[in-house]
Image (cartoon, rainbow, N blue to C red):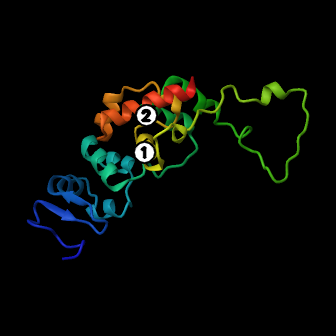
Amino acid sequence: MNDEQVVGNPDEAERTPGGSEIKSDEREALEAAGIDPAAVAAKECSYRTLLDDGVDESTADTLRRRFSLPWSFQTDGDLDRRSDEVRGLGEAERAWVAASEGDGWQAFDHTKSRAIESADEEETERPWPRPTPVRTVAGVGPDDAEELAEAGIISAERLATISAAEVARLLDLDVLHVRTWRYNARELIE
């Protein structure tokens, strides 16, 4: 039997080409919203698309995690709106995102630029330092960082202040791992 065939009772679950299953209740919710379950398995839908088409949030969230669906296909550059939509982002991180929206600090070409002294250098400096990437925390690997990013935790500063039990519950992780990461993040930023 290959991965594309229906496994067991066709009303229970359907195995997709990637090996993940779409359960019958999820398939029914998708079809009721007018979404082809195969499109979800092929990552042709985003989490935002599922919600906009009427799939309930818990089903959409489960499918997003299982199939690694993108949050949204929209990249309209509206960082303020996008930072408001990301759960778990603190006020300081929201302020940093808002301050980072302009092109001034990002438009830097290393190969063609040279140091130019400027009298108004203070005005061009970033108002906040860049957050410490979560991958710099001891014990957080690339896969762990991706999983934490799904919960809006992209900086060591944010990881240091999270509720370990809540994050462990949301991401289906061992609470001891999350507590260790939180402790290591606190050590790193002090």
Taking depth in this image into account, of 7 and 178 the one nearest to the observer is 178
Labelled pair 1, 2 in contact (Cβ < 8 Å): yes
Q: In the figure, 101 relative to 30: above or below? A: above
> What percent of the width, then of the height, locates residue 185?
49, 30
Mark 1 residue element: helix
The residue located at (74%, 44%) in the rendering is 107
> What percent of the width, then of the height, locates residue 159?
46, 31
Residue 181 is labelled as 2
Q: Quadrant of residue 118?
A: top right
Asked whether residue 54 is in view, the answer is: no
Whole-number angstrom distance, CA of label 1 to CA of label 2: 10 Å
Could you tell me the amino acid type at mark 2?
Trp
Q: Earlier in the sequence, mark 1 or mark 2?
A: 1
Asked whether residue 148 is in view, the answer is: yes
Q: In the figure, 94 relative to 40: above or below? A: above
50 displayed left or right of 130: left
* Viewport quadrant of the N terminus: bottom left
The residue located at (29%, 47%) in the rendering is 60
> What percent of the width, then of the height, locates residue 119?
90, 27
* Viewport quadrant of the C terminus: top right
Question: Dot 2, how many residues are within 10 Å of its Cα: few (below 14), some (14-19), or many (20+)?
Answer: many
Residue 144 is labelled as 1
Q: Residue furthest left?
A: 9
Could you tell me the amino acid type at mark 1?
Asp
15 displayed left or right of 90: left
